[in-house]
Amino acid sequence: MINREWHLLSRPVGWPKPEDFALVETEVPQPGEGQVLVRNEYLSVDPYMRGRMRLGESYAEPYELDKPMQGGAVGRVVASQAEGFAEGDYVLHFFGWREYATFDAKTAVKVDPNAAPLSTYLGVLGMPGLTAYAGLTRVAEFKAGDVVFVSGAAGAVGSEVGQIAKLKGAARVIGSAGSDEKVKLLVEEYGFDAAFNYKNGPVKDQLKEAAPNGIDVYFDNVGGDHLEAAIAAMNLHGRIVVCGMISQYNATEPTPAPRNLSQIIAKRFRMEGMLVGDHYDLQPKFVEEVSAWVRAGELKYHETTTEGIESAVDAFLGMLRGENVGKMLIKLPE
């Protein structure tokens, strides 16, 4: 059988370009002892992948050139040499960007396609969902009555942060997004109390109007002017969770730190970076609580899906440009 997989040909400078990638045909490797062969059905593209395309120290190793990239995926086991995994099982794993994947079964997690659609294990019930849940409830130490501001609020993580905050008793939830259509979605479907299009004026001014009494929690997916605006609006002993800084991922020059960071002294707010990998102990509680909200229709989600392995790079670039609503996925034909 022939497998198709995406390789990184060159490390992007600034915004990635299609010619930085190549779709390569290989033979499907058969599983060895303790391994499974999986036919992927959904692939995930995520902002953190941009960081893995550059060299340098980080929390994840850089992608190697001329080798298949990695990412979240869910698929069906078509051959197994591993105890506890049988043909026909569905698994969540980290060998995406390809049609077939062979890997050690111990790195896979079984999922139930009857309990929830397969795609949700990469989004609302997957890594982005756990990021939202852990970041808000543990890192931000959210409490009922907080005023919460979320940047990148129409994305897979941000939309879930805002909804969880509402479900847990936030006094007010404000979101920013990059289009008027997304702003409407945040308020009318996701239940945010207020939202604004950051392209329509200074973020600081729009946030002050949306949160006249300040904010207690800022969940940062963007960085830059959003972080500076959040610091300006931060109440005494507020909390900032730094999940991502997508506004800086493609910068070719160092970006300035927030010019008002000195306010951390007078306001005594706490700012903490987060990686979802530090919080997998919350996975059972997260799945139990969030899946119940999803089943009850209390927590809503959107997915933007492209078709075929050929579309993976376009999907990735579109995600970086903010063209997705909710989780960006690639669906592979069965």
Image: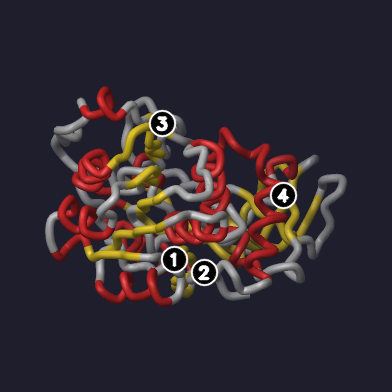
Residue 209's x, y, as percent? Answer: 21, 59
Q: Earlier in the sequence, mark 3 or mark 1?
A: 3
Amino acid type at image mark 2: Tyr
- The answer to the question of whether label 4 and label 3 lie on touching residues, with beta carbons closer than 8 A, is no
Instruction: Please state which of residues 330 and 327 is positioned toward the viewer in this rendering.
Output: 327
Residue at mark 3 to residue at mark 1: CA–CA distance: 24 Å
Q: What residue sits right under mark 2 in the picture? A: 301
Circle 3 residues within 10 Å: few <14, some 14–19, many ≥20: few
Q: Which residue is mark 3?
A: 272
Where 98 sits versus 82, above or below? Answer: below
Q: Which is more N-terminal, label 3 or label 4?
A: 4
Q: Alpha-carbon neighbours of circle 2 within 10 Å: few (<14), some, or many (≥20)?
A: many
Q: Residue at x 75, y 54 (%)?
A: 110
- Colour scheme of the picture: secondary structure
Secondary structure under the numbered disc 4 in the rendered image: strand
**Horizontal relation, residue 44 to residue 120: left or right:** left
Between disc 2 and disc 1, whose residue precedes? Answer: 2
- Under mark 1, the amino acid is Gly
The quadrant in which residue 253 appears is top left
Crowdedness near tag 4: few (<14), some (14–19) or many (≥20) residues, C-alpha within 10 Å: few
Q: Is residue 37 left or right of residue 61?
A: right
Disc 2 versus disc 1: distance between alpha carbons?
A: 7 Å
Give percent across and percent down for residue 324.
Answer: 37, 67
View extreme (right): residue: 83
Q: Which residue is mark 4?
A: 109
The residue to which callout 1 is attached is 326
